[in-house]
Image (cartoon, rainbow, N blue to C red):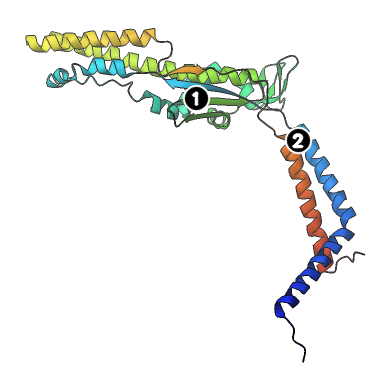
C-alpha cells in the first residue's frame, strides 16, 4: 500500500499549476507586449494633450487682534452697566474668513467684479512664450469679445471652487492657493482672494464702528447722568481708536509670511505617472484576456 503525503501532493499540484500558468502567459507574450505598447503609447499621447496647470501658494499669518480687543475690554464692565454692548466684531474674523472665501456671496460681490470671467470658464490654453491666453471659441469669441453662451454666476462660482483652496495649518497659519493654466493668473487671483478678504472685514468692522459711534452720540444727547456720559465718552474714544486701526492697517485679517509667486514648475498633470499607469493597465488587461481565452476555450495558444 502506497502512502501519499497530502501536503506534498498539494504542493506538487500547485507547482504544476503555476508552471502551466506561466507557460500560458509566455505563449501569449507577443499579444501582451503589443497590448501594453498600445496602452503605453495612448497614455503618453493623452498625457501630452493635457495642458499644464500651475498653482500659486500664499502663506498667511492671522493679524494679532489681542491689543484692540484688550483696549475695548478695559471698559467693557462699565459699558455693560450702562446697557451698551461694545463687543468687537473682528475677534472671530480669521475663522469666518476661511468659510467666507468659499461662499457664493463673496464670489459674486468681491471676486467676480475683479476678474476677467473668460479666464475662469472659457480658457483653452496658455501661450507661455507670449504670455497670452487662447479661449474656447465655442464659449467666448476673443476677437469680438462676445459670449456664445454666458455662464451663470452660480456655475462660475462652482468653477472657482474647483481651483481655490484655503486651509488652516496645525501651527495656526493659513495657506491659500489657486490653480490655473496661467501661472500669472494663479498668482494674481491668490493675491486677490487675500486682498478682498481683508477689505471685506475691514469695511464690515468699519461700518459697525461708525454705527456704534452714531449710537453713542445719540445716547450722549439723551442722558442727563454725568457718570453715564463719562462712560459714553470713553466708549466713543475707544471706537475712534478702533476706526483709526481699521483704516491704518493694510492687512486687516491676514498678513503675508510668504506671498504667492508666479510658479515656473507645473503641478499638473503628472505625465510620468499617467504613462506608467497606462503600461500597467496594458499588462494587466493582456494577462486577463490571455487567461480568459485559454480557460474558456475561445482561443488555443501554442
Q: Can you identify the residue that label 2 sits on?
A: 47
Q: Can you identify the residue that label 1 sits on?
A: 107
- State which mark lies toward you, 1 or 2: 2
Q: Secondary structure at mark 1?
A: helix
Look at the picture and state if 11 lies above or below 56.
below
Q: Locate the C terminus and report the quarter of the image it occupies.
A: bottom right
Look at the picture and state if 37 lies above or below 254.
below
N-terminal of the pair, mark 1 or mark 2, is: 2
Q: Residue sitting at 63 percent across and 27 percent down?
A: 121
* Label 1, residues with CA under 10 Å away: few <14, some 14-19, many ≥20: many
The quarter of the displayed image where residue 228 is located:
top left
Look at the picture and state if 117 lies above or below 47.
above
Q: Residue sitting at 77 percent across and 37 percent down?
A: 46
Direction from residue 121 to residue 102 in the image, left or right: left
Q: Secondary structure at mark 2?
A: helix
Look at the picture and state if 50 lies above or below 9.
above
Q: Marks 1/2: CA distance?
A: 32 Å
Closer to us: 123 or 85 = 85
The quarter of the displayed image where residue 94 is located:
top left
Looking at the image, can residue 164 be seen?
Answer: yes
* Label 2, residues with CA under 10 Å away: few <14, some 14-19, many ≥20: some
Image coordinates for residue 132, horizontal then vertical, percent: 71, 16
Looking at the image, can residue 224 be seen?
Answer: no
The quarter of the displayed image where residue 57 is located:
top right
Direction from residue 131 to residue 24 in the image, left or right: right
Image coordinates for residue 202, horizontal then vertical, percent: 38, 15
Direction from residue 275 to residue 201 in the image, left or right: left
Do callouts 1 and 2 mark residues in contact (Cβ within 8 Å)? no
Amino acid at each position: 500500500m502506497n502512502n501519499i503525503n497530502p501536503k506534498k501532493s498539494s504542493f506538487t499540484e500547485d507547482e504544476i499549476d503555476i508552471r502551466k500558468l506561466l507557460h500560458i502567459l509566455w505563449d501569449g507574450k507577443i499579444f501582451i507586449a503589443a497590448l501594453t505598447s498600445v496602452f503605453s503609447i495612448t497614455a503618453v499621447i493623452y498625457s501630452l494633450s493635457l495642458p499644464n496647470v500651475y498653482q500659486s501658494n500664499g502663506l498667511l499669518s492671522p493679524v494679532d487682534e489681542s491689543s484692540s480687543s484688550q483696549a475695548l475690554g478695559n471698559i467693557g464692565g462699565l459699558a455693560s452697566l450702562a446697557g451698551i454692548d461694545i463687543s468687537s466684531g473682528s475677534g472671530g474674523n480669521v475663522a469666518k474668513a476661511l468659510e467666507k472665501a468659499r461662499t457664493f456671496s463673496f464670489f459674486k460681490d468681491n471676486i467676480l467684479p475683479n476678474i476677467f470671467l473668460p479666464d475662469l470658464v472659457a480658457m483653452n490654453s496658455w501661450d507661455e512664450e507670449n504670455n497670452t491666453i487662447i479661449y474656447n471659441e465655442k464659449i467666448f469669441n476673443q476677437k469680438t469679445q462676445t459670449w456664445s453662451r454666458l455662464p451663470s454666476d452660480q456655475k462660475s462660482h462652482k468653477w472657482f471652487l474647483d481651483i481655490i483652496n484655503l486651509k488652516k495649518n496645525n501651527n495656526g497659519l493659513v495657506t491659500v492657493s489657486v490653480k490655473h493654466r496661467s501661472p500669472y493668473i494663479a498668482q494674481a487671483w491668490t493675491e486677490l482672494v487675500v486682498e478682498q478678504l481683508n477689505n471685506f472685514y475691514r469695511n464690515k468692522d468699519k461700518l459697525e464702528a461708525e454705527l456704534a459711534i452714531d449710537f453713542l452720540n445719540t445716547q450722549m444727547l439723551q442722558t442727563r447722568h454725568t457718570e453715564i456720559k463719562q462712560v459714553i465718552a470713553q466708549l466713543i474714544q475707544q471706537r475712534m481708536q478702533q476706526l483709526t486701526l481699521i483704516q491704518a492697517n493694510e492687512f486687516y485679517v491676514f498678513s503675508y509670511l510668504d506671498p504667492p509667486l508666479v510658479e515656473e514648475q507645473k503641478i499638473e498633470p503628472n505625465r510620468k505617472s499617467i504613462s506608467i499607469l497606462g503600461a500597467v493597465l496594458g499588462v494587466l488587461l493582456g494577462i486577463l484576456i490571455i487567461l480568459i481565452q485559454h480557460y474558456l476555450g475561445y482561443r488555443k495558444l501554442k
